[in-house]
Image: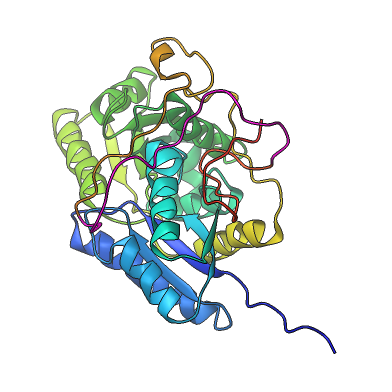
Amino acid sequence: MNAPTAPAPALLLVGHGTRDDAGAEAFRGFVDELRAFLPQTAVGGGFIELSPPPLADAVADLVAGGARSFAAVPLVLVSAGHAKGDIPAALVREKERHPGTSFRYGRPLGPHPALLTVLERRLDEVLAADERADTTVLLVGRGSTDPDANAEVFKTARLFWEGRGLAGVETAFVSLAAPDVPAGLDRCRALGAKRIVVLPYFLFTGILPERVAEQARDWAAAHPDVELRQAEVMGATQELADLVLERYREVVDGGDLRMNCDTCVYRIAMPGFEDKVGAPQTPHHHPDDPGHSHGHGHSHGQGHGKGHGQSHGHSDGHDGHHHHGH
């Protein structure tokens, strides 16, 4: 007699959170769509701060429904501090709250061809095909204090430029990193752009995408010699659902999920960030997480074995802790 097959791990979507109600509702709606898209898989989602439901509630609901094994997919575009530190620490806390559970952690979503497809669709909504050769795109990301995360946005911009017949694709950030939106638009203009499309590199609406739009409007009012158009955020598309499922299957299949650590400030002495090498992560307080305490940070220092196959926050499903895959 064959042993019963263990149920597939629950898909746990993890978001950062936003003070914008529409942005939070877009996340919750996307979780609902995935639940309908994957009727044979337990699906839940929560935020680490700012928005309901908190991650703790999402996990508790899945556990109450019988889930014991989780594949967590961060609904973030780049691997910055939240993906590298806060989310892994939150998963460790959930493992401790629910004895007998295990968590594995997937990769952030970008850069990925599916996202480029959605970005191109948003561009096409505001720009005719025969206008591309005379148009410069300004791709605007969130921005981070992590240079590796910012570099990923520049990589996405370069990939978006390739083969699409645009005059150019420049990059800017709405917070924490330079160039900011006005400086990015100034650069486009200095390079000769007469038409610019501001393309937000965000999944859902929120305070920061709205700030991008406001700053772009202000800049356009001060520079009437340049035609400026604004595209929408990417949104909950079928491509996004397929990409999340791809990240989920990577976790379930047990493949090598190492993130790029070659330029990680916690491992490599990058100019201006030397003090971060080997530093333990101590995630900041999340007021929406009851019973939160520090002390679940993870060190990027020595002692990481080669070939482990896990990195930056990839819980191994056994001890719930963070490991590198160097």
Name the residue rendered at 63%, 78% in the picture.
7
Q: Nearer the viewer, residue 35 or 320?
A: 320
Decide: is 42 above or below 218. below
Which of the two residues, 244 or 299, is positioned nearer the viewer here? 299
Relative depth, front residue between 184 and 56: 56
In the rendered image, residue 80, in percent from the top left (x then y), is placed at 42, 36
Q: Colour scheme of this structure image?
A: rainbow
Tell me if residue 30 can be seen.
no
Give above or below for 84 relative to 280: below
Q: Position of residue 60 (x, y in %)?
A: 37, 71
* Residue that sits furthest to the front in the current view: 99
Quarter of the image where the N terminus is located: bottom right
Q: Would residue 234 appear left or right of 66 to someone viewing this image?
A: left
Q: Position of residue 79 (x, y in %)?
A: 47, 39
Query: Magenta span has 304?
Result: yes
Q: Quadrant of the image for the C terminus? A: top right
Q: Is residue 309 left or right of residue 223?
A: right
**Relative image position of residue 307 (x, y in whole percent):** 73, 36
Farthest residue toward the bottom? 1
Q: Residue at x 53, y 38 (%)?
A: 312
- Give the magenta range: 288-308
Residue at 73 percent across and 84 percent down: it is 4
- The image quarter containing residue 95 is bottom left
Quadrant of res 184: top left
61 to the left or right of 321: left
Quadrant in the picture for residue 147: top left
Residue 205 covered by magenta stretch? no
